[in-house]
Image (tube, helix red, strand yellow):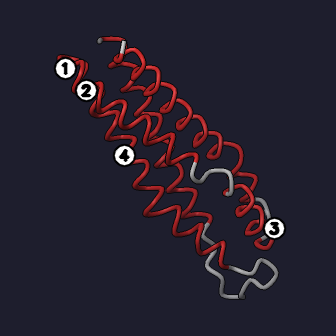
Amino acid sequence: MVSHILAVLALTASGVGAGVLTAVAISVFPALCNMPPERYVESHRMFGKGFHPTMPIVFNVGMFSAFALAVIEGGASSIPFTAGGLALLASQCVSHLGNVPINRRLAALDARNIPDDWDDPRPRWGHLNRIRASLAVIALALIATATAVS
């Protein structure tokens, strides 16, 4: 019974994480890239408000559930459960070490007074987002595979 609950948590959390980051990558972020800098800075702030602390919680639930399943289930499924948990951890690391610092710099910026020498973070932020979204999709595939073979 515990394994079934953990599997539901791991699959749901990794699916939500992968889905949200993929939606940002294919829809939200391209729209932000077409905005002038002032509007982009303000819009980026507004979009970001709903993600914290929800997304770290979602990713941690998926990650810890996958790790617990690796221990509880053992056997052939332990490797993809562990790898899925590690992929979720890696996605969070990209977020916390890459995207979040950019978000904080944007939050501190006066959108009405963007300096002439402003270094537009969109290319780097978008690249980091594609990496973390890819890791989340990989995590979902690994956790789904592990669930199927356990």
Whole-angstrom CA distance, mark 1 to mark 2, is 6 Å
Quarter of the rendering occupied by the N terminus = top left
Residue occupying image coordinates x 21% and y 26%: 71
Question: Is there CB contact under 8 Å for labels 1 and 2?
Answer: yes
Q: Is residue 30 above or below residue 61?
A: below
Q: Earlier in the sequence, mark 1 or mark 4?
A: 1
- Mark 3 = which residue? 39
> Which callout, 3 or 4, points to the residue nearer the camera?
4
Residue occupying image coordinates x 42% and y 26%: 141
- As helix, strand or loop, the secondary structure at mark 1 comes to loop
Picture coordinates of residue 11, whole percent (x, y) = 46, 24
Whole-angstrom CA distance, mark 4 to mark 2, is 15 Å
> Which callout, 2 or 3, points to the residue nearer the camera?
2
User: Hey, which quadrant is residue 94 in on the image?
Assistant: bottom left
Q: Earlier in the sequence, mark 4 or mark 2?
A: 2
- Mark 4 = which residue? 89
- Mark 2 = which residue? 70
Q: Earlier in the sequence, mark 2 or mark 3?
A: 3
Whole-angstrom CA distance, mark 1 to mark 4, is 20 Å
Residue occupying image coordinates x 79% and y 73%: 38
